[in-house]
Image (spheres, grey):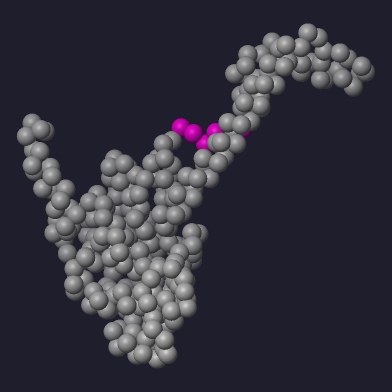
Amino acid sequence: MQYIDSFSLASEKNEVDFILSKNHKLNMTCYPSDNNAYPFKIFPQKQLHHLDFGAITMFYGGNGSGKSTLLNVIAEKLKLKRTAPFNNAPLFDEYLRFCDFELTFGRKVPDGSKIIASDDVFDFLLDIRKINEGIDRRREELFDEYERIQNTKEFRINSIDDYEELKQYNRDKKSTKSAFTAKRLPKELVGMSNGESAFSVFTREIKSDALYLLDEPENSLSATLQNELAGFIEDSVRFYNCQFIISTHSPFLLSLKEAKIYDLDTVPAQVKKWTELENVRVYHDFFERHMDSFK
């Protein structure tokens, strides 16, 4: 399924004319400042102006290649939902004025479409950690409370109003520490590793009939979970009418069937087969050197 067909970035002429119109020097930096040109001056250097999409489109490249910036530009131009903040520099909205896109004939960007960034996953993991740390503190308090009950010789009843409390006291005296604690403690968000919790973000957030932009979704995922995510994305396209635009250097994701891959490490940036990408070749050469170890 395809909702967006193509996207056009600011042309080199657009950028030159805009920058020359400024009466002060513009620098290229990811930090906010009055003379920050970001995201200008990135894509003309890669001779990248027009992008055609498939059901699955990948942006591949090393750190600083512009793949995350490209995702953010597309997400903001399409007004996609997002949770995590991004480097929205002073000229970001100015840059978007020079961008354009074409939707697949007869379609629109579905309301549920969104961008899921690495920070969304990390924030989720931190939230789980904070909740569990609070539960750990409560557990210690309950342990202390249990010890006080066990060390109390008798419960003094002053009126009929204390009767229910007496019954609870007697039950607590007979209870084990683990049973006493389990009844009063909220359930921990446990049972999953960080990687499994990260994987659950995608299975929870990705629904049917929508466009999704994923920024390096392999972060925090083991090789096994990256492979599972690849299968989940393929199934979401095949059976649930989803379209994906993904920035990644994971060979498990880059090898997705029918994926269209833009190599942002080359000039000009161009579409390549996943087996031609430098990162994938490094893995290939490594395993080829150690082939005897697998026999």
Residue at image coords 35%, 49%: 219
* Quadrant of the frame with the N terminus: bottom left
Q: How many marks?
A: 0
Dominant secondary-structure state across the stretch colored magenta:
loop
Q: Is residue 187 rendered magenta in the image?
A: yes
- From the viewer's perspective, is 64 left or right of 287? right
- Look at the image and tell me whether residue 235 can be seen: no
Residue at image coords 82%, 13%: 155
| Outermost residue to the top | 153
Which quadrant would residue 166 be assigned to in this image?
A: top right
| Residue 177, percent from left and from top | 62, 16
- From the viewer's perspective, is 264 left or right of 166? left
Q: Is residue 25 rendered magenta in the image?
A: no
Q: Is residue 188 above or below residue 60?
A: above
The residue stretch that appears in magenta? 186-191
Q: Is residue 49 above or below residue 207?
A: below
Residue at image coords 26%, 60%: 62
- From the viewer's perspective, is 103 left or right of 57? right
| Residue 189, percent from left and from top | 52, 36
| Residue 20, percent from left and from top | 36, 90
Q: Is residue 182 above or below residue 156?
A: below
| Residue 164, percent from left and from top | 82, 20
- Look at the image and tell me whether residue 117 can be seen: yes
Judge by depth and name the residue closer to the eye, 212 or 249: 249
Residue at image coords 25%, 76%: 45
Q: Is residue 144 above or below residue 60?
A: above
| Outermost residue to the right | 159
